[in-house]
Amino acid sequence: MDSAAQGGKAYGLLKSQQEETLNAINEAFLSEPNYAEEDDLRSKLEMFNNNYMEFDLNDKGDIDLMAFKRMLEQLGLAKTHLELKEMMSEVAGGTSKETISYNDFLNMMLGIRNAILTLILMFEGMGKDQEPKDTAPPARTTLSDLP
């Protein structure tokens, strides 16, 4: 019987294993001398871990093109298929991979391959604390109002 068909217990075990793997990668980054100067590295890694697991839609431990698209759409930054593929290639260091691994993700967020996702995820966390803005519909316009 397929483990996906076993229900909640198998799913919980899978998620627990994935979290252990990501935590092990986080520990390796914490002991990495290249990131020793990074402010509040442990809490950043925890935030990145949570974001990564949220968008691991296929539960395989990586973010595929559709999950990446969903992540950006949820943040209000819809991209074309070509733009998504280019961004994924940048994150993966120039390779044409179809997924983003957690190592690639952390290298992008903390390393030299900083890209738009760094800013997006930082601002997403800051935006959750703000009160919602007044979103009234725009005033109705008639043809006589046009220039």
Image (cartoon, grey):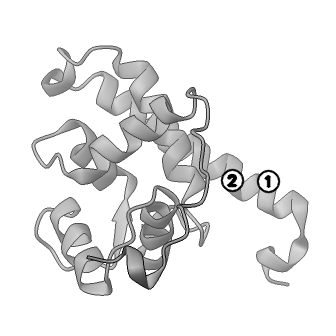
Residue 49 location in percent, x, y? 49, 41
Q: Residue 12 carries which label?
A: 1
- Residue positioned 49% across, 51% down in the render: 52
Q: How crowded is mark 1: few (under 14 residues within 10 Å), some or many (20 or more)?
A: few
Q: For the residues marked 1 and 2, what is the alpha-carbon distance in whole angstroms?
A: 5 Å
What kind of residue is marked 2? Answer: Lys
**Would you identify the image quadrant in which residue 37 lies?**
top left
Q: Residues within 10 Å of mark 2 (few under 14, many from 20)?
A: some
- Residue positioned 61% across, 52% down in the render: 136
The C terminus, quarter of image:
bottom left
Q: Is residue 105 visible?
A: yes
- Residue positioned 43% across, 72% down in the render: 69
Q: Which mark is residue 15?
A: 2
Residue 27 location in percent, x, y? 40, 28
Residue 102 location in percent, x, y? 39, 52
Q: Is mark 1 on a helix, strand or loop?
A: helix
Residue 14 location in percent, x, y? 70, 58
